[in-house]
């Protein structure tokens, strides 16, 4: 997330002048503009007889799902000071990216946003 005034201005100009798109390159560039670089985009497809043995076993609805893995998230776990509505575990730092992807993704798709592992 941009934290300096020039970076915030650049983010606003980028948002106002963006043309849009549905390619991996478009979403990578959008994530880079928000401060997440590099990102990995994974598209899922149903498991068929032509699939490789190492492919995930996904059924037909997964055709419309894709995943963006981005650096910069921090794992946060439930503590005794949290409220009962707080998730047991979640990641902090990807809210801006998740919001931007949600606004620009094709309407018929589901996007999963997760933090990149350091392993």
Image: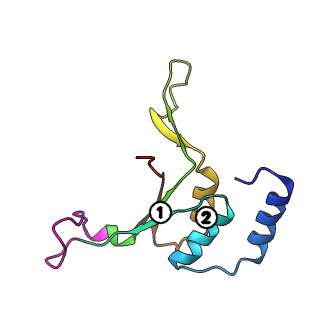
> At x 57% / y 57%, what residue is drawn?
98
Q: Is 52 in the magenta?
A: yes
x then y, percent, for residue 16: 78, 73
Residue 102, above or below 90: below
Q: Is 103 in the magenta?
A: no
User: With 43 as the anchor, is 76 left or right in this view?
Assistant: right
> At x 66% / y 58%, what residue is drawn?
35
Task: Using a 10 Å C-alpha cutoff, classify the residue at mark 2 as few (fewer than 14 neighbours), some (14 to 19) or many (20 or more).
Answer: many
Secondary structure found at label 2: helix
Task: Using a 10 Å C-alpha cutoff, classify the residue at mark 1 as few (fewer than 14 neighbours), some (14 to 19) or many (20 or more).
Answer: some
x then y, percent, for residue 38: 55, 62
Residue position for label 1: 111
Magenta stretch secondary structure, dominant? loop
Displayed quadrant of residue 25: bottom right
Displayed quadrant of residue 22: bottom right
Q: Residue furthest front?
A: 119
The one of 33 and 49 positioned closer to us in this rendering: 33
User: With 81 as the anchor, is 5 left or right in this view?
Assistant: right
Secondary structure found at label 1: strand
Residue position for label 2: 31
User: With 7 as the anchor, is 73 left or right in this view?
Assistant: left
The boundaries of the magenta stretch are: 47-61
The one of 60 and 90 positioned closer to us in this rendering: 90
Q: CA distance from mark 2 to mark 1?
A: 14 Å
């Amino acid at each position: 997330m941009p934290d300096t005034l020039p970076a915030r201005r650049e983010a606003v100009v980028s948002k106002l002048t963006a043309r849009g798109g549905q390619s991996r390159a478009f979403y990578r560039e959008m994530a880079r503009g928000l401060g997440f670089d590099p990102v990995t985009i994974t598209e899922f497809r149903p498991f068929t007889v032509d699939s490789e043995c190492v492919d995930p076993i996904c059924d037909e609805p997964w055709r419309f799902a894709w995943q963006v893995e981005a650096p910069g998230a921090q794992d946060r776990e439930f503590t005794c000071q949290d409220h009962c509505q707080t998730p047991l575990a979640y990641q902090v730092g990807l809210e801006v990216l998740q919001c931007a992807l949600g606004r620009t993704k094709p309407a018929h798709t589901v996007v999963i946003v997760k933090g990149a592992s350091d392993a």
